[in-house]
């Protein structure tokens, strides 16, 4: 464990089926999260140095590794621009939102308990729009 | 967590948990079972016969885009012998339908099917934008729903098709069952689970996705990378349906079979004979010839309200009485062109279709 840099995990997040409208109408985001959530909560660090405005490093409570449940909270607090009730309900995504982890249904990956790995692709698709 | 293998082929890695069965399956098996189940639904209900002309009601959204793809796939694979068309209705909603119609025009090329677009403006003389500017956002879904149904039938008649298929999925039907129970609408409850409906002289309508879960339709579109449009209607969705939908999604999260269970419940309801006897029989609208359970069909009633500046008329009984008290409809009232079903074989005249762009 190096003391000069805090380990982070970078993932690609994609929104579809209309959910992108809640995230500034941008479908793809690159997000860097702390690999392990420090305890106690220690505020949010600034964006990383590659110049992308949507790249940020976040912190939260507990010492658990960053998982999809944490990513959902982080997205709500940091990237979501409107109507949070259409994205989250309780501790998870609103029923009717499909989640894929590396192109696999998150129901096969432990849902919110899936621990994020470097380079993972997480897709959120709303099924709630007209067909 | 170790990768799981597909419950069907026992070979490839599973990518999806089926809500209907709980099975974990791989991508190829998913495509195969999804398409095969729709095929079985079609065959068991005897929906088509060789040579049928079938219009796919296409909105550019996920359901109708997947339906167009699957209908084309099955027609080729099982040699149904169908002539397929895309039929789209332009409700006249700026910034919503005009964008989704662009998706339908791309589908026309991708699936190589003739496309017909028919607008509310040309049939009824009113766009939804104009209707909303008169009635507001509260009841506009009533107008849109009634007008769309009739517009699809008129579009289908002009294409001389025998049959319209729509992308209604299992979730939609379960929602409708719940809504009809909550409203005590026995007549619609009986009809809403039927896979195929046909009025006296209208074109057959059916729902090949009756047993297809929305989750699987969206996953199918995602894995096949189908091009669909997904923006909420700008005139806010039907609030009542929205509640039924949210309730259903909560039920599904607790027990995935809830959707199919509700459809089965809807099918199992039996209406007693003495209740059936009180239901109105179908006739044709005295003004436009469309099927109706009253002298005037719902679309003509709504249109008369709009034209006379009393748009609430067909929505509440009290407003209808006020409209009647104003006297009969004026002779110069704008009406809907008379509906004629022209599916007689061999008499098809050329129809103006969209030119591929």
Image: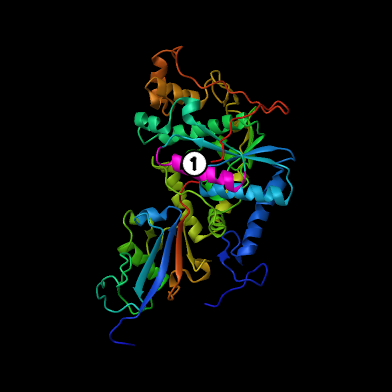
Residue B239: x %, y % from top left: 41, 42
Query: Is residue B143 on the magenta stretch?
Result: no
Disc 1: CA contacts within 10 A as few (<14), some (14-19) or many (>=20): many
Q: Residue at x 62, y 61 (%)?
A: B30
Measured along the vertical axis of the image, is residue B325 above or below residue B236?
above
Which residue has dot 1 on it?
Answer: B101
**Chief secondary structure of the magenta portion:** helix
Towards the viewer: B170 or A20: A20
Measured along the vertical axis of the image, is residue B193 above or below residue B131?
below
Q: Residue at x 67, y 67 (%)?
A: B8
Q: Image check: A54 left or right of B58?
A: left
Residue B331: x %, y % from top left: 46, 11
Towards the viewer: B104 or B33: B104
Which corner quadrant of the image does residue B200 belong to?
A: top right
Would residue B210 be seen by someone viewing this image from the given angle? Answer: no
Measured along the vertical axis of the image, is residue B334 above or below residue B122?
above
Query: Is residue B110 on the magenta stretch?
Result: yes
State the count of labels.
1
Towards the viewer: B294 or B330: B330
Residue B176: x %, y % from top left: 52, 43
Measured along the vertical axis of the image, is residue B201 above or below residue A96?
above
Residue occupying the far front of the picture: B357
Q: Which residues are magenta?
A: B94-112
Would residue B140 be seen by someone viewing this image from the given angle? Answer: yes
Q: Residue at x 41, y 73 (%)?
A: A67
Which corner quadrant of the image does residue B290 belong to?
A: top right
The chain letter for the residue carrying disc 1 is: B
């Amino acid at each position: 464990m190096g003391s000069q840099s805090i380990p982070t995990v970078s993932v690609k997040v994609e929104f579809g089926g209309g959910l992108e409208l809640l995230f500034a109408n941008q479908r793809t985001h690159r997000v860097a999260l702390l690999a392990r959530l420090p305890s106690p909560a220690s505020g949010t660090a600034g964006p990383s140095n590659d110049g992308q405005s949507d790249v940020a490093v976040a912190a939260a409570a507990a010492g658990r590794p960053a998982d999809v449940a944490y990513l959902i909270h982080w997205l709500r607090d940091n990237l979501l621009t409107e109507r949070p009730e259409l994205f989250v309900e309780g501790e998870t995504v609103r029923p009717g939102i499909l989640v894929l982890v590396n192109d696999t249904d998150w129901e096969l990956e432990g849902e919110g308990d899936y621990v994020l790995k470097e380079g993972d692709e997480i897709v959120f698709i709303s099924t709630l729009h007209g067909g | 967590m170790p990768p799981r293998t597909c419950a069907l082929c026992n070979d490839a890695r599973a990518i999806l948990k089926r809500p209907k069965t709980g099975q974990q399956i791989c991508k190829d098996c998913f495509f195969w079972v999804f398409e095969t189940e729709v095929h079985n639904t079609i065959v068991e209900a005897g929906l088509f016969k060789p040579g049928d002309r079938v219009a796919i009601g296409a909105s550019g959204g996920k359901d109708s885009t997947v339906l167009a793809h699957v209908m084309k796939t099955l027609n080729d694979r099982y040699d149904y012998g169908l002539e397929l068309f895309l039929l789209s209705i332009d409700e006249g909603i700026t910034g919503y339908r005009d964008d989704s119609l662009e998706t339908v025009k791309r589908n026309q090329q991708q699936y190589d099917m003739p496309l017909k677009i028919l607008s509310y403006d040309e049939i009824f003389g009113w766009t939804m934008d104009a209707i909303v500017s008169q009635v507001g956002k509260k009841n506009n879904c009533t107008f849109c729903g009634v007008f769309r149904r009739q517009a699809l039938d008129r579009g289908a008649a002009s294409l001389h098709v025998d049959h319209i298929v729509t992308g209604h999925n299992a979730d939609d039907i379960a929602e409708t069952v719940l809504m009809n129970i909550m409203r005590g609408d026995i007549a619609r409850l009986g009809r809403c689970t039927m896979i195929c409906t046909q009025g006296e002289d209208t074109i057959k309508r059916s729902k090949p996705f009756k047993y297809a879960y929305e989750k699987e339709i969206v996953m199918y579109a995602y894995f096949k990378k189908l091009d669909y449009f997904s923006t909420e209607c700008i005139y806010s969705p039907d609030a009542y349906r929205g509640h039924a939908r949210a309730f259903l999604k909560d039920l599904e999260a607790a027990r995935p079979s809830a959707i199919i269970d509700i459809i089965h419940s809807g099918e199992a309801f039996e209406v007693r004979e003495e209740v059936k006897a009180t239901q109105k029989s179908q006739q044709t609208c005295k003004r436009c010839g469309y099927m109706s359970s009253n002298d005037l069909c719902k679309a003509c009633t709504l249109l008369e309200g709009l034209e006379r500046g009393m748009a609430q008329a067909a929505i509440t009984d009290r407003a209808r009485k006020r409209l009647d008290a104003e006297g009969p409809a004026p002779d110069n009232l704008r009406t809907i062109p008379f509906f004629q079903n022209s599916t007689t074989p061999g008499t098809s005249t050329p129809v103006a279709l969209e030119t591929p762009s």
